[in-house]
Amino acid sequence: MKCSEVHKDLIFYIEGDLSPEREKALRKHLDSCSDCRAYEKFMRQSLGAIEMKKDVPADDEFAGKVLEKMSSVPIKTFSIAPVLKYAAAAAVIVLGVFTGMGIANLTTNTSTDKLAEAGEEYYYHDEMEPIESFFLIKYDEDE
Amino acid sequence: MLRNNNDTEERQLINALVAGNESAYRIIIEKYRESVVRLCMGFTGSYDDAQDLAQEVFIEIFNSISKFKRRSSFSTWMYRVAVNKSLNFLRKKKNLVSMEQANETVTPANNNTSAEKNLEISDHARALHTALDRLPGKQRAAFILSKYDDLQYAEIADIMKTSISSVESLLFRAKKNLQQSLLEYYKNNMK
Ligand SMILES: [Zn+2]
């Protein structure tokens, strides 16, 4: 076995994913190659950092912080916001009629977008998405 | 962790969450804080960031609880929200970093603080996090759910709305990519 083959399979060796034959061949190479042993040590320690990070210290203040942050965010706005948006858009259109503005160049879409921007501080667009579809969209973007 | 004889208890707890009951919030946090923080550790690499992100995750869970249709177990849905939030966090961070790089206004003071910070993190933890940072989102999510939260493949498949064989394939590719990044890191920094 060559060093380059160890480089390709080492993580699977450490994880115990290799066939018994492959594992044996790799161990044999490691026994005789100090370069690959040094690399193996580095790889084991790097993956070992995961175990160290798993220890989550106790935190008595955590729940309090979450509840405090929640009370500072107007939760109800999330469900009211879309209603307000359309009501406001309708108001603009009605206003347009009264002031004699042509509705043709003031489509519902552009007016709602503008109003949504204006009211942005009251709600978060990404959090208004249903979680399920949000999740799928985000994944589609990734790979 | 999935459907067991605590079903009724869980149903009552969810009902209390929907009603906005504060002690229900506290029970959920008590029960799942460690799992969520661990997951966030995998995504952020730093305990402080993980704490902040985990708080955001719980806020999102409580605010969106009415969207939980009980088609999966609560913990599956919770992990889904947590993965979502974490990927979003990474996206925002990436945007911020690229904005900073575009501005290229790194002052000597900034350099000092980052050097100090780097000294606090061990080489191995940094190598691992650098490698994780380079994984595509799906691979990273599967790897973190498996390695940081020790979830079974079936559970990961439920969370990610995919098949067990897709999870296996994601984990295989994640390990291969991590190995590649770690090897580069090793050659550049450790030899
Ligand atoms: Zn070798």
Image: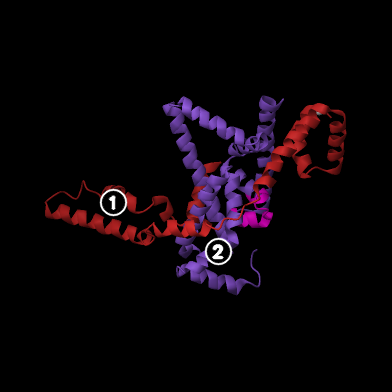
The kind of residue on which mark 1 rests is Thr
Could you give the CA–CA distance between mark 1 and mark 2, rounded to whole angstroms?
A: 38 Å
Please tell me how crowded label 1 is: few (under 14), some (14-19), or many (20+) other residues with Cα within 10 Å.
some
Question: Is residue A123 rendered to the left or right of residue B13?
Answer: left
Element type at marker 1?
Answer: helix
Predominant secondary structure in magenta?
A: helix
Task: Point out the frontmost of discs 1 and 2.
Answer: 2
- Give the colour chain A carries in the figure: red
Which corner quadrant holds the C terminus of chain B?
top right
Nearest the viewer among B191 and B91 is: B191
Which corner quadrant holds the N terminus of chain B?
bottom right
Question: Is residue A10 rendered to the left or right of residue B182?
Answer: right
Residue B118 place in picture, x, y as percent: 59, 33
Q: Which mark is residue B28?
A: 2
Find residue B153 and report its image quarter. bottom right
Residue A59 place in picture, x, y as percent: 57, 55
Nearest the viewer among A77 and B108 is: B108
Q: Which mark is residue A112?
A: 1
Find residue B10 and report its image quarter. bottom right
| Chain letter, purple | B
Element type at marker 2?
Answer: helix
Whether residue A48 is visible: yes
Question: Is residue A137 rendered to the left or right of residue B174?
Answer: left
Height in image: A16 above or below B29? above
Q: Residue at x 64, y 64 (%)?
A: B2
Numbered disc 2: what chain? B
Whether residue B138 is visible: no
Nearest the viewer among A77 and B35 is: B35
The verdict on a common chain for dots 1 and 2 is: no
Q: Which mark is residue B187?
A: none
CB of mark 1 near ligand 1 (< 8 Å): no
Range drawn in magenta: B145-160
